[in-house]
Image: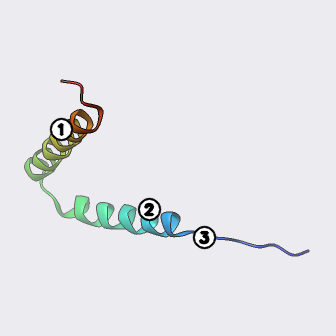
């Protein structure tokens, strides 16, 4: 029985990003985590508005 496993670059990038986030999250204080989460949400909101043109 032949089995072929194909890993594309998106899978490898996702695994690497997940590992990095877990390591960084383990070292953060709750205040730092809150600041990062706030910045991520703000950046995502601004980018969504810029891409869709909805104000």
Q: Within 10 angstroms of label 2, few (less than 14), some, or many (20 or more) residues?
A: few
Could you tell me residue 51's position as x and y percent?
28, 38
- In the picture of the structure, the residue carrying the numbered disc 3 is 7
Please state, as top left, top right, bottom left or bottom right, where the N terminus lies in the image.
bottom right
- Helix, strand, or loop for circle 3? loop
Observer-nearest residue: 32 or 37?
37
The tag earlier along the polypeptide, 2 or 1, is: 2
Q: Earlier in the sequence, mark 3 or mark 2?
A: 3
In this view, the residue in front, 28 or 47, is 47
Tell me, for residue 14, which label it has, or none: 2
Query: In the picture, residue 23 is in which quadrant?
Result: bottom left
Question: Is 42 displayed left or right of 8 in the figure?
Answer: left
Residue at screen point 8% across, 48% down: 31
Q: Earlier in the sequence, mark 1 or mark 3?
A: 3
Residue 7 spot, x, y in % from top left: 60, 70
Foreground: disc 2 or disc 1: 1
Query: Is the Cβ of the residue at disc 1 closer than 8 Å to that at disc 3?
Result: no
């Amino acid at each position: 029985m032949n089995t072929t496993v194909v890993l594309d670059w998106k899978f490898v990038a996702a695994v690497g990003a997940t590992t990095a986030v877990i390591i960084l999250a383990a070292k953060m204080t709750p205040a730092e985590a809150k600041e990062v989460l706030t910045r991520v949400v703000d950046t995502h909101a601004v980018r969504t508005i810029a891409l869709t043109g909805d104000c």
